[in-house]
Image (cartoon, helix red, strand yellow):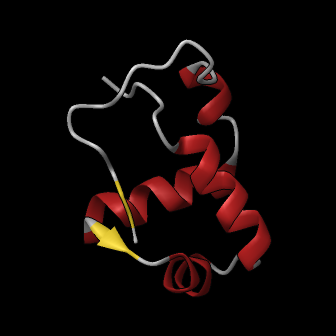
Amino acid sequence: MVKINSPAIKSSNSPPIDEVLSSRGRVKILKLLAEKGEINISAISKQVKLCLLYTSDAADELDGVDLG
């Protein structure tokens, strides 16, 4: 299951917010997670119409990003 952590975990190696939001795929994933809360990777992939590998990689990149 993937969920948005609240409060976000700050990590020194996390990408800057502008880099995260520069990808349409990552933005779609963030929107879906904001709506659903917690959802598994395959369901995310199907709902945002992205391949499973990209969705998994994007979720890993989003994990721990400070959105606040």
Total marks in image: 0
Which percent across, then down, holds residue 63? 50, 43
Residue lying at the far top in this picture: please name it.
12
Quadrant in the picture for the C terminus: top left
Q: State which quadrant residue 56 falls in.
A: bottom right
In the foreground, 21 or 39: 39
Which percent across, then down, holds residue 24? 67, 52
Quadrant in the picture for the N terminus: bottom left
Q: State which quadrant residue 17 falls in.
A: top right
Left or right of 40? Residue 45 is right
Identified at 41% across, 24% down, the residue is 66
Identified at 67% across, 66% down, the residue is 55
Identified at 63% across, 23% down, the residue is 15
Q: State which quadrant residue 5 falls in.
A: top left
In the foreground, 31 or 67: 67
Left or right of 4? Residue 48 is right
Relative vertical location of residue 39 with respect to residue 32 in this rendering, above or below? below
Which percent across, then down, holds residue 33? 36, 62
Left or right of 17? Residue 4 is left
Residue lying at the far left in this picture: please name it.
6
